[in-house]
Image (cartoon, grey):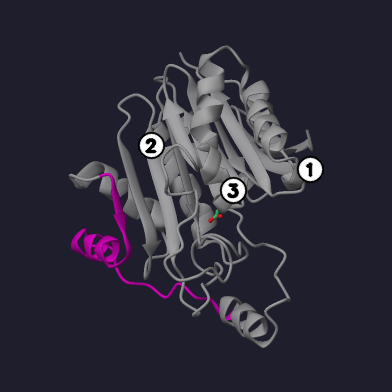
Amino acid sequence: MAKIIAIATWDFGKAAVAKSGEILATGGTAIDAVEKGINVAELDTNIVSVGYGGMPNATGEMEFDAAIMNGRTHAVGSVATLTGYSRPISVARAVMEKCQHSMLVGDGARKFATEQGFAIEETLSEESKKKYSLWLADKNAKPEFMHDTIGLLAMDCRGELVAGCSTSGMAFKHPGRVGDSPLIGSGLYADIEAGAAAATGNGDEILKFCMSFLTVEFMRNGDSAMQACQNVIKRFVAQHPEKINEDVNLIALSADGHYGAATLRDSFAFGLWDGAQARCQSVKRI
Ligand code: GLY
């Protein structure tokens, strides 16, 4: 039997992988583990950068980015600047499974979600509205969490490997701004032969290096999951030493089920479930 494991970004990833673990431990699929795990974060009102209650854009509207990728079939589903639905990862999964295309954006993504039977929901919490009003009053007063995506990677008992991510994107972004999260290869990537990776942090930097794809390629070339994450960040800093304090963070799972993470922060927490209890771990700045 394959190693069953789930890893997710940030400390809030612990509750997400606890859900993934429930699914994986009872023989469930990696695709369900990723979707349902991410749904936990999307619906948690205390998480202010993902799903319901996330961070609105510069006009006060919530625009979500999300994507999912199957490492065996390389099937992908992605939505960008999606409005009106609090579980964008579920809409991304519907794109993967029910749409002839790979990625839908804006009004088209919203129309597709409606066609698939998703009910329109309120996505702004009172807290989101308050944070937006504070920002309008003082645009220099940036919130603590500017762009903290949930990325979740899971391997199931059949050896299937899936990556997913979901975010409201950079707080107070220009309407229409798309970050790394819905871009296959940037916010996430999965290939059963090499591994899976997801990124979180400043998507405008992450997407320039296709950081998740690069992490998977480093694993394909022999790096462990930990080394691959570190080597991507080292390359970024080697080429841009002026960005040494940029918010760039990665998690990875190798094809044989080992995990890794790396960060340019002082420390970066992630949630891990590997057969026992979900727990939080962290890595220090490389
Ligand atoms: N990493 C999320 C974003 O920048 O949109």
Q: Nearer the viewer, residue 252 or 1?
A: 252
Question: Tag 3 or tag 1, which sits nearer the N-term?
Answer: 3
Residue type pointed to by label 3: Glu
Q: CA distance from mark 2 to mark 1?
A: 27 Å
Q: Does mark 3 have its CB less than 8 Å from ligand 1?
A: no
Q: Which residue is mark 2?
A: 69
Q: Residue 205 has which mark? A: 3
User: What is the total number of numbered labels drawn onto the structure image?
Assistant: 3
Contact (CB < 8 A) between labels 1 and 3? no
Q: Is residue 26 visible?
A: no
In this view, the residue farthest toward the bottom is: 137
| Percent x, y of residue 250 | 62, 37
Indicate left or right for 123 with 74 as reference: right
Badge 2 density bin: few <14, some 14–19, many ≥20, Cα 10 Å: many
Q: CA distance from mark 1 to mark 3?
A: 19 Å
Residue type pointed to by label 2: Met
Element on which disc 3 rests = helix
Q: Is residue 269 visible?
A: yes
Indicate left or right for 210 with 269 as reference: left
Which quadrant of the frame does ligand 1 lie within? bottom right
> What residue span does the magenta drawing correspond to?
102-126
Seen at 70% across and 83% down, the residue is: 138
| Percent x, y of residue 200 | 59, 47
